Image: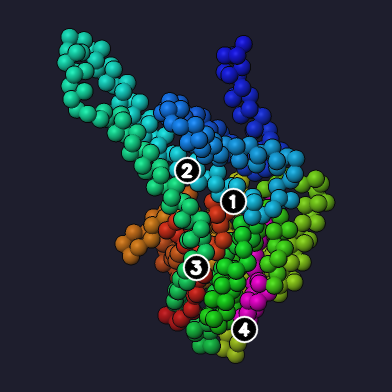
Amino acid sequence: MKIKLNHFLLPFLLFIGYFLMLYSMPKYSGQYMFLVIIILADFYLWSSVKKQVFNYRYWLRMLIIFVYWLPLFLLAILLVGSVLIPVINWNDTLRTYMVGVILVFYTSKILPITFLFLADIVRVIQKLFLIVKRDNRQQLIEKKKEEGISRSKFLQYIGFISGGLVLGTMFMGMFRWAYEFKIVREKIKFQNLSKEFIGFRIVQISDLHLGTWTSKKPLQRAVDMINDMNPDIILFTGDLVNYATNETIGFEDVLSQLRAKYGVFAILGNHDYGNYVTWPSQEAKQENMKQLYNFFDKIGWKLLNNENEIINKASGQLALIGVENWGANPRFPKYGDLDKAIQGTENTDIKILMTHDPSHWEKVVIAGNYDIDLTLSGHTHGFQFGIETKEIKWSPAQYMYNHWAGLYQDTKKTGKYIYVNRGLGSIGYPGRIGMLPEITFIELVSA
């Protein structure tokens, strides 16, 4: 009976885990199968190291066991705890570090698991080779002894070393690079830019995800950096929170300090609608949105929900157009109504669109040949991981989005641009590796 229980316990717990995630975090339930694969791979790795671990002294053995299974233990607490206490009511710092530790440890195990799998393949091939060459079996065994470390052992060692490097790097990303703000400066040329808008200074920020900030101090530093640029206008392109508006508590005094000649404008991102958690009622969800709108009013940011704001100068007009979230991926809401938002902007010289998801530019703005000169987006975070040098620009984000970080021009060379901000905050993994949090400074110039 004991053997049967051991065989059925893990599948049963994984089955229960799916329904816990479906209930507490429905938007993430589609990723549960990937999570199951990671957990099974975790047990696979443990089966390889446990024999060695149990040869260590008791205190060291217990320490290794605790550290090894810590991410699975935290994951179980996250799933069960979010059912007992809705995740929106958790302490933001506690939740951020819990999720961070889970992601760091599981990511760092991927390389050891991969190399262990390769090592097992090598062992299988060697055994098959011994079976085929039965006459020379003893000679092959003696030769293997003379070679010293086997290929399979070598692969395992490489896996553990690389996993340790990943672990250390990811913790550096959490505690050092997460708030190492980078100012990216761009000059964008327009043919029909009126004289008085030449040199117009735009600062774009995006994806604050306030629920992931463990302190107000770095955000205050970012606000001071922005104000020092003396922008004409500040534009926030969505995702103020992770799950719910209560994440904004304590940040009002910092964000209200942002100053620009023509004001601060904002749009909503996919996370701002409260779709990533289960609400006790539809009324509670609506109240959450009401609180979000009130927060924008309190800090003095004007929210553009499928509407526009026209900036007038003696020599011309600039239209600022803001739409609600529109994402090509079926997981993301499609509330953005560009036709409604552009009404009244027909005679303006320059049109700037704020839309959270860059897929909107490709699938709607360009495909529909809309008269939009510059689109500003965020959403991708640059995957919070990548390599950016003068010669290399790479991130896993590029396999999900055609426009994922920086400035792009329409391939038809129509003078239409999109800029994708890498985000100021983080989501999931509370850190950055090679893809630093960004403040974008854009200057409009005449072609």
Q: Which residue is mark 2?
A: 107
Number of the label disc, if any, that sits on residue 97 = 1
Indicate the amino acid at tag 2: Thr
**Which residue is at a point 64% across and 50% down the rendered structure image?**
95
User: Taking the image as drawn, is residue 148 in sight?
Assistant: yes
- Local crowd size for mark 2, using a 10 Å CA cut-off: few (<14), some (14–19), many (≥20): some
User: Distance between the Cα atoms at labels 1 and 4?
Assistant: 38 Å
Indicate the amino acid at tag 1: Tyr
Q: Earlier in the sequence, mark 3 or mark 2?
A: 2
Most foreground residue, 290 or 10: 10
- Local crowd size for mark 4, using a 10 Å CA cut-off: few (<14), some (14–19), many (≥20): few
User: Distance between the Cα atoms at labels 3 and 1?
Assistant: 20 Å
Q: Helix or strand or loop: what does disc 4 sit on?
A: loop
Q: Position of residue 154 (x, y in %)?
A: 29, 33
Q: Residue 227 falls in which quadrant of the image?
A: bottom right
> Magenta segment, which residues?
254-275
Quarter of the figure with the C terminus: bottom left
- Local crowd size for mark 1, using a 10 Å CA cut-off: few (<14), some (14–19), many (≥20): some
Q: Earlier in the sequence, mark 1 or mark 4?
A: 1
Quarter of the figure with the N terminus: top right
- Local crowd size for mark 3, using a 10 Å CA cut-off: few (<14), some (14–19), many (≥20): some
Q: Are marks 4 and 3 in contact (CB under 8 Å)?
A: no
Q: Earlier in the sequence, mark 1 or mark 2?
A: 1
Q: Earlier in the sequence, mark 4 or mark 2?
A: 2
Indicate the amino acid at tag 4: Lys
Q: Are marks 3 and 2 in contact (CB under 8 Å)?
A: no
User: Taking the image as drawn, is residue 322 in sight?
Assistant: no
Q: Which residue is mark 3?
A: 181
